[in-house]
Image (cartoon, rainbow, N blue to C red):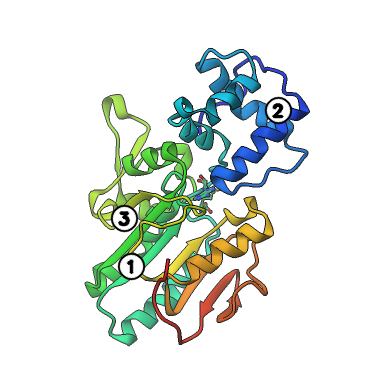
Amino acid sequence: MTESRFDIKKISLSDAEFEKLRDLVFKVSGISLAETKKELVVSRFTKRVKALKLQNFSEYYDLLVSPSGFSEVQNFINSITTNKTDFFREAHHFDFLVNTFIPQVISSGRRIVRIWSAACSTGEEPYTIAMVMAKHLVEPYNIPVKILATDIDTNVLKTAVRGVYESGVLNTVPEEYMKKYFLRGKGDSLGLFKIKDDIKQMVTFKQLNFIAPEYPVTSTFDIIFCRNVIIYFNPETKRMVVNRLFRYLNDGGYIMMGHSETLFNMIDGLVYLKNTIYQKKMYNSGPEN
Ligand SMILES: C[S@@+](CC[C@H](N)C(=O)[O-])C[C@H]1O[C@@H](n2cnc3c(N)ncnc32)[C@H](O)[C@@H]1O
């Protein structure tokens, strides 16, 4: 959800309506909302109720579960996701790319690297990966890097594909990266910065819902970034999602988690290295969806 949530008069939400919407959020996205999140539900969905000229949340729920409400479900999902992200967020993961992963790629003689930014939000994470890999691997060693970036939320994916950011969003980008990989907007685009095409071309964006029965993913990966998303899931969904992601990881590959997320005791065959970085043991086969 990217727009302001505070500019619209709120509609009251009964406990029964809250329960129904909460169940539906879980069913379509896997996101588990605590019982304390009633206010959040009001603030996230009021705008949709008003936009559709409905009277209350019961009408909104009835629409969502009716055949004619099918197309509203994506707006419903987009409204409830939390998309906070940053360029170079949790920077130790990018230091790990430079100091550990890239030297391993070079010494192994590998000819291509594949990385998945699962839950990529507005693109800051996959573009950070792309810039770091471009500077330290693609340009000096001519080894191509392909990045898959996925998210459930179609609004954030549109922003990500556009690759245009306001200067305030770029505070965490080191100066040398700004100079090398961004174009400064002029005229009507003053104050905006566009990620350069060479970096953009390294990233493929796709919509992917972690709880969908099938993932539109055919490759396996050397690294999967799955940061700051499983915190929104209950223990069972967490386990299911990370076990599925694990099958897309090459032997010896890494999974990067967010600062408050642990995979402790969740997957056999995954070893904790350091700083929320896990490594797949050197055995096992490719994906079985
Ligand atoms: C807080 S952001 C994290 C972004 C980035 N990984 C980072 O750490 O900066 C969480 C993202 O997870 C996405 N998300 C939530 N539920 C999802 C699901 N079921 N499938 C795929 N993505 C989901 C949200 O849309 C949101 O963009």
Respond yes or no on whether mark 1 lies under 8 Å from ligand 1.
no
Amino acid at pointer 3: Val
N-terminal label among 1 and 3: 3
Amino acid at pointer 1: Ser
User: What is the x, y in percent for residue 27?
Assistant: 58, 44
| Cα distance between the residues tagged 2 and 3 | 40 Å
Which of 289/117 is in front? 289
Residue 203 image label? 3
Q: Furthest residue to the front?
A: 67
The answer to whether 219 is drawn above or below residue 60 in the figure is below
Residue shown at 61% from the left, 47% from the top: 31
> Which residue lies under the disc numbered 2?
17
User: What is the x, y in percent for residue 47?
Assistant: 56, 21
The answer to whether 62 is drawn above or below residue 279 in the figure is above
User: What is the x, y in percent for residue 230?
Assistant: 60, 56
> Which residue lies under the disc numbered 1?
219
Amino acid at pointer 2: Glu
Respond yes or no on whether mark 2 lies under 8 Å from ligand 1.
no
Q: In which quarter of the image is the C terminus?
A: bottom left
Residue shown at 48% from the left, 27% from the top: 69
- Choose mark 1 or mark 3, whichever is in front: 1
- Determine the secondary structure under disc 2: helix
Residue shown at 64% from the left, 54% from the top: 231
Which of 287/259 is in front? 287
Q: How crowded is mark 1: few (under 14 residues within 10 Å), some or many (20 or more)?
A: some
Q: In this view, does 80 lie to the left or right of 67?
A: right
